Amino acid sequence: MSFTFLSLTLKRYDPMKIMYSTVLRSLALGAVAGLVVLSTPASAQTYPSKPIKVIVDGPAGGINDIWTRRYTQRLSESMQQPVVVENRPGASGSIAAEAVAKAAPDGYTVMYGGMNPLVAYPGAGGVVRYDPTKDFASVALGTMGYPVFVINSALGIKTLAEFQQRAKAKPDEFLCGTAGQASVQHFACALVSRALGIKMRTVPYKGGSASLVDAASGQVQVAVGYTAELEPFVGPGKLTVLASFAPNRLPKFPNAPSFAEAGFPGLELPSFSGFFMPAGAPKEAIDRFNAEAIKAMARPEMIEWRQSVGGYYELFKPAEYAEFVRREQAKWKRMSDDLSIRAEQAN
């Protein structure tokens, strides 16, 4: 499109013609400015300019759901846009991951979680309809922490030694609930079985919180969970913590030893959760979300809560976080091979 500007050669002063010329010039310049605005990429506009949806890779009440809702409350305040949570549990988190991978890469669809669907499950050969290394942009670390090993309190077993003795005497008695095939919890059950020299069958659920519900009711006997999601079961005495996969005792469970303290060194199992966007998301969106997530974690109440549940944190910029995720993917692939864990196993 081209514009012709009128120029008038006046032999004498004519205010009406001068005004008409000025109006036409203004309209033409406005049209050109409008074209410039229309040609500006959407990513160059201020982010966020509309609500953000965060898809959680686990069920309501699970550890990732708990962390997501604590984060999003603060992110909504700081970014001045609603941050809406949507739970899509199942298939070791791969249902949520697939939804995010296929979403528009505009910065307005985000996944929280990632440990199971991007690291543990595909590393164990899980068939997924996305590429865990290429289809996601690593945005911001959520938190890092250690799971704990729990047992149904009605069994009357108080220590890891008692559990080991009972499991060796009755090898078919114990079912270990997990968050899905080749999930962190599945790996944890396998590590316990090998270290204690016992046999346990694993039972996959759509998320860790569902396995804890069944462990508390006796549908399975043992399970693996995280401090924040265990409080409703341990406090009322439905589940007993036998040991943690942390290097030291966890603040919430001061009477429960670490596996190393209980005589089984090497059973540390750190895991993480965090934010991911579809690959190709605007750099502005990634950088802003990263900065706001770090600010949220720096708030005193978030630090206090993280420390109370035995979590820890590292200040990752997006590129650093992406490199960390790549290292975790390689590490858990090696662990899968070492433990002979495959995603298609029945137990």
Image: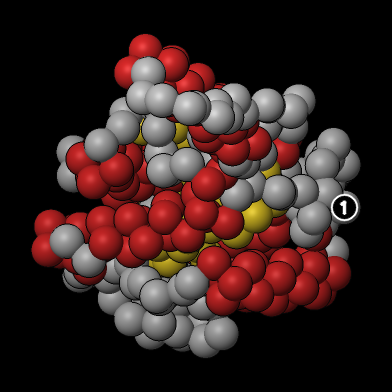
Residue closest to the eye, 228 or 22: 22
Residue closest to the eye, 128 or 43: 43
Report x, y in % for residue 169: 60, 58
Is the residue 260 above or below the residue 75 in the image?
Answer: below
Instruction: Report whether residue 4 is seen.
Output: yes
Q: Give the residue at x 83% y 49%.
A: 131
- Give the left or right position of residue 265, taking residue 196 as reference: left
Q: Which residue is mark 1?
A: 125
Q: Give the residue at x 71% y 49%.
A: 279
Q: Give the residue at x 79% y 68%.
A: 333
- Give the left or right position of residue 223, taking residue 312 as reference: right
- Give the left or right position of residue 36, taking residue 68 as reference: right
Is the residue 328 above or below the residue 280 in the image?
Answer: below
Report x, y in % for residue 325: 64, 67
Report x, y in % for residue 226: 39, 54
Which residue is outermost to the left?
300
Q: In what quadrant of the picture does the N terminus appear?
A: top right
Q: Give the residue at x 43% y 66%.
A: 144
Residue closest to the eye, 37 or 216: 37
Is the residue 293 above or below the residue 331 in the image?
Answer: above
Amino acid carrying mark 1 in the image: Gly
